[in-house]
Image: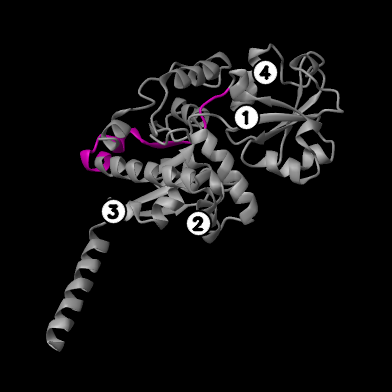
């Protein structure tokens, strides 16, 4: 009996070792630091959804000095999270990124201004300072200014653009009349700083029809031509969207998983997760073609990209993932 038990244990260990060896490795590079913005991926790993698909996923946090487009171009990742504008700009420069899934159906970007300040409507922007982040996050803002006919060179007929830090200090210290926020992040920081919703004028990109696609999943075009890699991405997207669905249905638990993986301030992560859930929609990860066309047109109009992109997205991955 003892020999049988030992043999069974050895067999189980051998099977576990074989599964660990057999699992396909995937490196995911995030756009920013560990936070609920990326909860679906952390949940998928924590709940074993990747393991169920035969994947061993390494999630690499981003930061202010990390450009996901450069990481994947250099071979440091198999798939990245980035905004469509940044991906199309990179593709225009020769980094052939392809959108393989679009978890975020809606944009979370907003411009907020104190109600007691000089800005009440878009007509008040002229001659004032507006803050926006750079590193690819500025494209939606510039597209909006182009749409309403305002220059961004600081002249009297346009606006002065403040290269905004990744916090709300420019608003608190009155370095800008309005600053950029994400519904799920900095807007909460503005409230934490003592502002109340009724104290703010909010310009929501989605509500204005100025939203460009935000967090999507991108892989390199040449790698997607390999059937084995494509199959790996199908399994990765299927597990990731299962993670996103779970996260949107279990907000507090998802926030806790993010904190366990290095996210800061559980209460803020819960706030963030609740707001992110509103942007994910039905968690199928499918790209909305009209949103893609709007994003590409805005970049073309502003000359951020020099030619109309082709082959910049594929529905093959999400189609197969949903089967």
Q: Which residue position holds label 3?
A: 52
The answer for how far apart the CA atoms under marks 3 and 1 are is: 38 Å
Marks 4 and 2 sit apart, C-alpha to C-alpha, by 38 Å
- Category of crowding for the residue at label 1, using alpha-carbon neighbours closer than 10 angstroms: few (below 14), some (14–19), many (at least 20): some
User: Is label 4 or label 3 in front?
Assistant: 3
Q: 48 above or below 157? A: below
Asked whether, in this view, residue 183 is left or right of residue 92, the answer is: right
Tell me the distance, in whole angstroms, between the alpha carbons under discs 1 and 4. 11 Å
Tell me the number on the disc at residue 138. 1
Circle 2 residue: 257
Segment colored magenta = 211-230
Q: Which residue is mark 4?
A: 145
N-terminal of the pair, mark 4 or mark 3, is 3
**300 left or right, relative to 17:** right
For the question of whether residue 76 can be seen, the reply is no
Depicted 2 relative to depicted 248: above or below: below
- Residues marked 2 and 3 touching at CB (< 8 Å): no
Which quadrant holds residue 23?
bottom left
Q: Are marks 2 and 1 in contact (CB under 8 Å)?
A: no
- Residue 249 at what x, y percent from top left? 47, 44
Q: CA distance from mark 2 to mark 3?
A: 19 Å
Give the mark nearest the N terminus, 1 or 4: 1
| Magenta-span inclusion, residue 313 | no
Dot 2 lies on which element? helix
Query: What's the residue at 44%, 52% (across, down)?
Result: 43
Tell me the residue at 82%/35% (across/down): 175
Q: Nearer the viewer, mark 3 or mark 1?
A: 3
Task: Give the quarter of the figure containing the N terminus.
Answer: bottom left
């Amino acid at each position: 009996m003892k020999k049988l038990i030992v043999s069974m244990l050895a067999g189980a260990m051998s099977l576990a070792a074989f599964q660990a060896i057999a699992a396909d490795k995937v490196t995911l590079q995030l756009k920013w630091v560990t936070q609920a913005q990326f909860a679906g991926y952390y949940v998928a790993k924590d709940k074993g959804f990747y393991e169920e698909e035969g994947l061993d996923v390494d999630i690499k946090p981003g930061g202010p000095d990390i450009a996901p487009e450069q990481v994947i171009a250099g071979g440091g990742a198999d798939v990245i999270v980035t905004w469509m504008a940044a991906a199309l700009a990179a593709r225009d420069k020769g980094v052939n990124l392809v959108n393989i899934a679009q978890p975020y159906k809606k944009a979370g970007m907003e411009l907020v201004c104190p109600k007691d300040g000089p800005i009440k409507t878009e007509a008040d922007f002229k001659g004032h300072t507006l803050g926006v982040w750079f590193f690819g996050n500025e494209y939606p803002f510039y597209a909006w200014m182009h749409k309403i006919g305002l220059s961004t060179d600081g002249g009297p007929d346009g606006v002065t653009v403040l290269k905004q830090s990744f916090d709300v200090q420019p608003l608190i210290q009155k370095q800008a009349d309005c600053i950029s926020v994400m519904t799920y992040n900095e807007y909460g920081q503005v409230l934490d700083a003592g502002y109340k919703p009724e104290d703010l004028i909010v310009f929501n990109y989605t509500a204005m029809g100025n939203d460009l696609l935000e967090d999507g999943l991108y892989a390199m075009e040449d790698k997607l031509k390999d059937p084995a890699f494509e199959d790996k991405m199908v399994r990765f997207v299927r597990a990731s969207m299962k993670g996103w669905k779970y996260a949107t249905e279990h907000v507090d638990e998802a926030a806790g998983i993010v904190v366990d993986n290095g996210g800061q301030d559980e209460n803020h992560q819960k706030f963030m997760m609740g707001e992110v859930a509103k942007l994910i929609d039905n968690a199928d990860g499918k790209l909305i073609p009209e949103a893609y066309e709007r994003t590409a047109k805005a970049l073309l109009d502003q000359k951020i990209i020099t030619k109309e992109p082709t082959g910049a997205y594929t529905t093959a991955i999400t189609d197969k993932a949903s089967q």
